[in-house]
Amino acid sequence: MDAEYIARLVKIADNLFYEKTSLHLNDVEKNILEQILIGKKFDDIQVGTFTNETLKKYWIPKLWKHLSVAFEKKILKTNVLGELQDLDKKQRKIIPCKLSINRWRLTKNTHVKDLNRFQDKEISCIKSNNSKPTPNHQNTCTDAGEQKVEDEATAQTRDWSPSVYQVAVTKSLIGTNSTSGGHTYIKYIKPGIPLLLALGVFGVWFSLSWLANWYGAKSYLAGKLPQAELGYKIALKLNPRSGATFYNQGVVYEDRQNYQQAHTQYQKAMELGLVAAYNNQARLYLSEKKYDKAVALLQISLPLAKHEDNRVKYSMLKNLGWGRLGQGRLAEADLALTQAIELQDNFSSAYCLLAQVLEQQGDNKKALKEWENCLRYAHQPQTPEEDKWMNQARQQLNIAGGIE
């Protein structure tokens, strides 16, 4: 099988999963699926910086789970290729046709000029068995798919559920009679009325969701946590697919020390594809001294954060260093914290943690320098751990005579 055919099968799997769940397979799952389809053994599969053990224990089972949901049957290595090939054969039975054959008619007919946006765009259609050629040799075909319209509910994330609108192109639509006048014009406007009404309802719905989320954010920044929690709850009632709102709600619960609910909200945000939620979930695990869980989560999320802001990447690397320190894997902690500092050299937490790593490695001279950086870039501590590290830095520098 050539690379183009493999890519087609992977795309079919992704589209089917999206149809069933409104979610896409992520890049790691697609990469694994490609390697499986070309015949690689599990022990030989490699993706980014993941260890083969992580791929086999976490990512490959996750891929089978998602594909089983998509196909509505148990999917494993033994049957995945056959199922995708069967689906590919079914899809190839759909005969592609183009509307460009009618281009000159559309551009000359004033009653259908609004259909010009369909020119030269290929749609999937099935030729009717009982259709007969018209004098203009036009084909009768029906759209085999659904046009999905997506918009953004907030500036942070695409969350709203797409509306669906069937586009039917028939010879009666193209073959208009210029003498029919207003009746023909109404014929084209009438099918669009339900769509316009639906868009209006969705517009009001998501405007209300946005306002509730805005109220929650404004209340949070003002320190009014109960009001912020209420705003986010209303926003999620209106739009339960908003990863950003779940994330914001998790931050509120965390500030109110309701850590169980914070875990729940971050998990939902992760499931909706918000990469920053992985980091907050991992940080909660670190504060609970569940270092293995935190490190596993960060190893999964770091490759997904390649397009994120440097502050998000910094925080993930800093937390990975924290987790490795907790595991006693000092060389790996040193590497992660150094990478974090290279991204953001004016944040204190990575310096505080690196000082602890160097102390455990026995390099007290370098550790003192990092304790100095820990205080130099310190602002108002955001977490109990940061407050603890600030105090630890003062104590260490006092002992060494570094500060008064």
Image (spheres, rainbow, N blue to C red):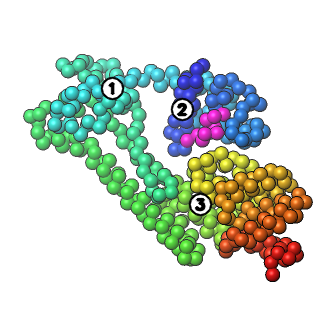
**Viewport quadrant of the C terminus:** bottom right
Name the spot of residue 286 as percent of width and height, x first: 76, 60
Give the residue displayed 58% in from the left and 52% down from the top: 308
Quick check: is 368 in the magenta stretch? no
- Near-viewer residue (133 or 3): 3
Amino acid of disc 2: Lys
Name the spot of residue 289 as percent of width and height, x first: 80, 61
Q: Earlier in the sequence, mark 1 or mark 3?
A: 1
Question: On the image, numbered disc 2 is attached to which residue?
Answer: 11
In this orientation, does residue 23 appear? yes
Q: Magenta residues, as a range? A: 24-32
Give the residue displayed 18% in from the left and 19% down from the top: 135
- Near-viewer residue (16 or 56): 56
Badge 1 crowding class, 10 Å Cα cut-off, few under 14, some 14 to 19, many 20 or more, is some
Name the spot of residue 23 as percent of width and height, x first: 54, 44
Name the spot of residue 61 as percent of width and height, x first: 70, 38
Identify the mark at residue 98; answer none if there is no mark: 1
Classify mark 3: helix, strand or loop. Answer: helix
Left or right relative to 213: residue 41: right
Magenta portion: prevailing SS class: helix
Classify mark 1: helix, strand or loop. Answer: strand
Q: CA distance from mark 1 to mark 2?
A: 22 Å
Q: Earlier in the sequence, mark 1 or mark 2?
A: 2
Question: On the image, numbered disc 3 is attached to which residue?
Answer: 247
Give the residue displayed 17% in from the left and 37% down from the top: 111
Q: Earlier in the sequence, mark 2 or mark 3?
A: 2
Q: Are marks 1 and 2 in contact (CB under 8 Å)?
A: no
Badge 2 crowding class, 10 Å Cα cut-off, few under 14, some 14 to 19, many 20 or more, is some
Amino acid of disc 3: Tyr
Q: CA distance from mark 1 to mark 3?
A: 44 Å
